[in-house]
């Protein structure tokens, strides 16, 4: 096989999902040759398709003899493999959990070719020329705490057709003793961390995502995201996604000295730490925000592009959290929602209880919005992640007509078989007129425009239909 000059930079898919083989331009003359072995801007361009995998280390394995054979090793990081001198026969086996487990791809690699090997795909090679220098970029540092997976080079199931019989080549004792495919423990996907797991949204996310070995549901007792030690609290390179469903949500308490400190710590400083961790480790960050980032004076629905104008302390900390999350250089999603209803104590459950007990409530009638159920937020988050939607802010609420809290309460009374006229509408000022503790200002208009999320395929059920289903369930 002669080194081929003048190829165009291009990539091809292989039978193993995510494993890409590249043609590299090599320029040569009588003096020798030159190539750009790694060029981030060109290789991550859409038409070439290499993931922007963030390499942190470059390793070179030099092999004196023909037939040197190494592998099959699957590590918990991505690698970009090329040859500086010489030639190899490469064999790759998918050792990740999933439908493609055991899939095989083989190819010869010389300086004019390279291959991108995603995390969990077993990598092995056999040298076909003397003095072969095998080079690979990786996006993590070796760690004794990382999880590795191995496969025997002689495995009969994958049946790799080695150019030089394995009985005739140099193989390490460790590589000789790796398990057969039937005994391999597949490498699990990178972890997903859900913070605030005991909250209403956290419980909805557990129901949506399920219980799997690679999903970690963390309460404050498990992981304090406001801790100064957060950056070392986990081996963050093992994570693909952080869904931040935690936060300080006591709107009025945030107006007190102690509440102010807690709100800034949990809603802003903690998000800044998560954003930094996401950037440093290539983690997708999902952060849940609020309609409170707006002052509610706009006449129409708020879009993702509208400038924030928070009123109270809680609102200010949520707006600061949005800024921190958007600073992540990794893929990130800021989910703005409003009037959230989930499993546990909430406005709808309270109104249903009052109706049943014969209590006639006074409810605010000058704040306008739409209900959003935690199951819908969880489904939207999963959809945006699975569909690889563009980063940024997405408004996620129920759809349908905008109403007041008083209208919602009357609808709850009606749907539970009670007279809706038992609910009396009052202004926000009147409702809180007798309050003795600090009261946070509320936005008068909490209606969020849903067109961006819906354009990506996010479903926005009508809040009235969702309310009906919710009341049937409780």
Image (cartoon, rainbow, N blue to C red):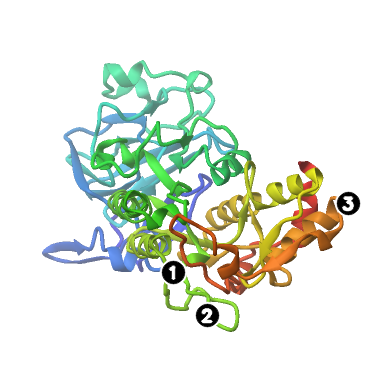
Q: Please name the residue shown 37% across and 46% down the image.
A: 108
* Viewer-closest of 323 and 135: 323
How busy is the neighbourhood of tag 1: few (under 14 within 10 Å), some, or many (20 plus)?
few
Q: Is residue 119 above or below residue 289?
A: above
**Residue found farthest to the bottom:** 299
Q: Secondary structure at mark 1?
A: loop
* Viewer-closest of 166 and 300: 300
Q: Is residue 106 above or below residue 70?
A: below
Horizontal and vertical percent for residue 375? 65, 49
Q: Please name the residue shown 20% across and 47% down the image.
A: 58
Q: In the visual, does 45 lie left or right of 35?
A: right
Question: Distance of mark 3 from mark 2, alpha carbons?
Answer: 35 Å
* Viewer-closest of 277 and 97: 277
Q: Secondary structure at mark 2?
A: loop
Q: Is residue 100 above or below residue 39?
A: above
Picture quadrant where residue 23 is located: bottom left
Q: In the visual, does 275 lie left or right of 310?
A: left
Horizontal and vertical percent for residue 462? 74, 63
* Viewer-closest of 352 and 174: 352
Residue at which label 1 appears: 47
Picture quadrant where residue 143 is located: top left
Sequence order check, earlier mark of 1 and 3: 1
Question: Distance of mark 1 from mark 3, alpha carbons?
Answer: 60 Å
Residue at which label 3 appears: 417
How busy is the neighbourhood of tag 3: few (under 14 within 10 Å), some, or many (20 plus)?
few
Residue at which label 2 appears: 297
């Amino acid at each position: 096989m002669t080194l081929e000059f003048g190829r165009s930079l291009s990539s091809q898919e292989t039978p193993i999902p995510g494993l890409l083989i590249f043609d590299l331009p090599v320029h040569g003359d009588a003096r020798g040759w030159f190539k750009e072995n790694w060029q981030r801007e060109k290789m991550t361009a859409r038409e070439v398709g290499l993931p922007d995998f963030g390499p942190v280390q470059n390793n070179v394995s030099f092999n004196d003899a023909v037939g040197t054979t190494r592998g099959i090793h699957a590590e918990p990081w991505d690698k970009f493999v090329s040859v500086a001198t010489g030639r190899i026969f490469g064999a790759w086996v998918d050792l990740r959990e999933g439908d493609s487990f055991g899939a095989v791809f083989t190819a010869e690699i010389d300086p004019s070719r390279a291959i991108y090997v995603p995390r969990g795909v077993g990598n092995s090679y056999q040298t076909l020329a003397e003095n072969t220098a095998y080079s690979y970029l990786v996006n993590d540092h070796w760690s004794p705490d990382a999880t590795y997976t191995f496969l025997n080079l002689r495995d009969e199931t994958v049946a790799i057709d080695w150019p030089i019989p394995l009985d005739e080549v140099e193989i390490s004792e460790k590589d000789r003793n790796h398990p057969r495919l039937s005994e391999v423990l597949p490498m699990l996907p990178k972890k997903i961390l859900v913070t605030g797991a005991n909250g209403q949204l956290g419980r909805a996310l557990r129901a949506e995502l399920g219980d799997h070995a690679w999903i970690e549901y963390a309460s404050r007792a498990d992981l304090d995201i406001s801790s100064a030690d957060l950056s070392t609290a986990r081996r963050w390179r093992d994570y693909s996604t952080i869904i931040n469903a935690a936060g300080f949500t006591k709107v009025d308490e945030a107006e007190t000295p102690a509440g102010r400190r807690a709100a800034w710590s949990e809603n802003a400083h903690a998000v800044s730490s998560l954003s930094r961790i996401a950037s440093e480790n290539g983690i997708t960050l999902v952060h849940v925000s609020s309609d409170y980032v707006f002052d509610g004076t706009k006449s129409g629905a708020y879009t993702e592009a509208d400038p924030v104008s928070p009123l109270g302390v809680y609102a200010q900390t949520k707006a600061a959290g949005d800024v921190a999350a958007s600073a992540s250089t990794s893929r990130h999603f800021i989910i703005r929602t409003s009037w959230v209803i989930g499993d546990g104590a909430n406005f709808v459950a309270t109104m249903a209880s009052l109706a049943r007990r014969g209590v006639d409530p006074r409810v605010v009638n000058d704040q306008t919005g739409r209900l959003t159920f935690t199951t819908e937020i969880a489904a939207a988050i999963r959809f945006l992640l699975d569909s690889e939607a563009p980063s940024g802010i997405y408004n996620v609420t129920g759809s349908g007509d905008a109403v007041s809290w008083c209208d919602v309460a009357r609808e709850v009374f009606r749907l539970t078989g009670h007279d809706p006229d038992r609910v009396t509408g009052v202004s926000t000022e009147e409702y809180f007129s007798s309050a003795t503790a600090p009261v946070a200002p509320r936005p008068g208009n909490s209606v969020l425009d849903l067109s961006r999320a819906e354009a990506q395929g996010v479903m926005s059920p009508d809040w009235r239909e969702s309310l009906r289903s919710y009341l049937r369930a409780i």
